[in-house]
Image (cartoon, rainbow, N blue to C red):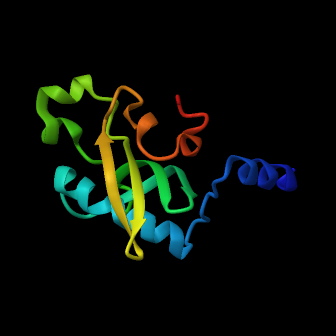
């Protein structure tokens, strides 16, 4: 089964960096400043998806406070939080000058805004 998954990933042209890997950490650290500007400091991510293809990355995360404590979206966004898809964050990043730079991101998006940002193959199975 593992060989089949690897073959599918290679066919799609992306890899999913393992938890704890330097690649995964550096991609998430590219997203972190923008998310912390909106949600406050002390944010860690519960990763739903992280894919890297060449110099592009696509991530879907659920931000939380360090130690797994929930973030109060109502306090941050007020009545607008009721129209959001929770605090789930998606981001598209591009490696430039040896570091991951955020191209675009959204928190609580209710659509698939990311389909036309970067390689579409990174978002296969996620509405694109």
Q: How many marks?
A: 0
Up/down of 119 relative to 26, above or below: above
Residue 24: x and y in percent read 51, 66
Up/down of 115 relative to 103, above or below: above
Residue 38: x and y in percent read 18, 50
Q: Residue at x 25, y 62 (%)?
A: 33
Q: Residue at x 37, y 63 (%)?
A: 67
Image-based side of 119 in relation to 102, left or right: right
Q: Residue at x 37, y 41 (%)?
A: 88
Taking depth in this image into account, of 67 and 14 the one nearest to the observer is 14
Taking depth in this image into account, of 90 and 93 the one nearest to the observer is 93
Image-based side of 86 in relation to 16, left or right: left
Image-based side of 59 in relation to 111, left or right: right
> In which quadrant of the rendered view does residue 100 lie?
bottom left
Taking depth in this image into account, of 24 and 67 the one nearest to the observer is 24
Residue 90: x and y in percent read 39, 44
Residue 64: x and y in percent read 34, 53
Q: Residue at x 21, y 51 (%)?
A: 39
Up/down of 76 relative to 21, above or below: above
> In which quadrant of the rendered view does residue 113 lie?
top left
Image-based side of 28 in relation to 43, left or right: right
Instruction: Look at the image and tell me whether residue 6 can be seen.
Output: yes
Instruction: Look at the image and tell me whether residue 65 can be seen.
Output: no
């Amino acid at each position: 089964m593992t060989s089949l998954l690897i073959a599918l990933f290679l066919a799609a042209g992306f890899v999913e960096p393992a938890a704890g890997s330097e690649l995964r950490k550096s991609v998430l650290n590219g997203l972190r400043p923008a998310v912390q500007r909106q949600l406050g400091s002390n944010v860690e991510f519960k990763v739903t998806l992280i894919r890297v293809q060449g110099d592009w990355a696509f991530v879907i995360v659920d931000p939380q406070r360090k130690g797994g404590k929930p973030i109060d979206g109502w306090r941050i966004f007020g009545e607008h939080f009721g129209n959001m898809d929770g605090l789930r964050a998606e981001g598209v990043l591009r490696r430039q000058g040896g570091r991951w730079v955020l191209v675009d991101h959204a928190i609580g998006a209710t659509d698939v805004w990311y389909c036309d940002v970067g390689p579409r193959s990174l978002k296969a199975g996620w509405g694109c």
